[in-house]
Amino acid sequence: QVQLVESGGGLVQAGDSLRLSCAASGRTFSDYTLGWFRQAPGKEREFVASITGRAGVLLYADPVKGRFTISRDNAKNTGYLQMNGLKPEDTAVYYCALQIPGSSRFDYWGQGTQVTVSS
């Protein structure tokens, strides 16, 4: 079983930056695709970014392209989401998740970390 723990959320002003971290247990972190998702109040959870396990192929949602950067350190079993130029519409609970190779969905989820951006 894999466990994920997010950290790094907080209250910031528009234009500020935050870096979220996602610490994973288990020995096969490097095989999994890492994803970040977010859910704002009253809205459905939405995809933010992902990075594959070894090849490091990146994918971003349009609203965060050019502002957010996803990365991972497989030696530390940790993933990151660097968020620059934050906007009030980025306010949400941010979740990290892992996708097992060959799976059609993200299989493991963290508990989430709150990001609040004031105008």
Image: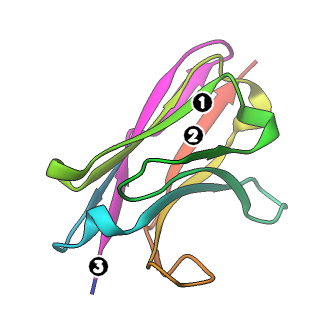
Q: Considering the image in quadrants, where does the C terminus appear?
A: top right
Kindly identify the residue that appears in the image at 72 percent across and 33 percent down: 64
Q: Residue furthest right?
A: 42
Q: Earlier in the sequence, mark 1 or mark 2?
A: 1
Q: Quadrant of residue 103?
A: bottom right
**Viewer-proximal residue among 117 and 86:** 86
Say left or right for 117 vs 52.
right
Kindly identify the residue that appears in the image at 45 percent across and 67 percent down: 111
Q: Are marks 2 and 3 in contact (CB under 8 Å)?
A: no
Q: Give the colouring mode of the picture.
A: rainbow
Q: Earlier in the sequence, mark 3 or mark 1?
A: 3
Label 2 sits on a secondary structure element that is strand
Q: Amino acid at mark 3?
A: Val
Asked if the magenta segment contains residue 96, the reply would be no
Mark 1 packing: few (<14 Cα in 10 Å), some, or many (20+)? many
User: For mark 1, what is the residue?
Assistant: 68
User: For mark 2, what is the residue?
Assistant: 115
User: For mark 3, what is the residue?
Assistant: 2
Q: Position of residue 57 (x, y in %)?
A: 52, 48
Q: Amino acid at mark 1?
A: Phe
Q: Earlier in the sequence, mark 2 or mark 3?
A: 3
Label 1 sits on a secondary structure element that is strand
Q: Quadrant of residue 15?
A: top right
Q: Position of residue 41 (x, y in %)?
A: 77, 56
Cα–Cα span, label 3 and label 1: 25 Å
How many marks do you count on the picture?
A: 3
**Viewer-proximal residue among 55 and 12:** 55
Cα–Cα span, label 2 and label 3: 24 Å
**The residue stretch that appears in magenta:** 2-20
Label 3 sits on a secondary structure element that is loop
Q: Position of residue 71 (x, y in %)?
A: 41, 39
Q: Amino acid at mark 2?
A: Val
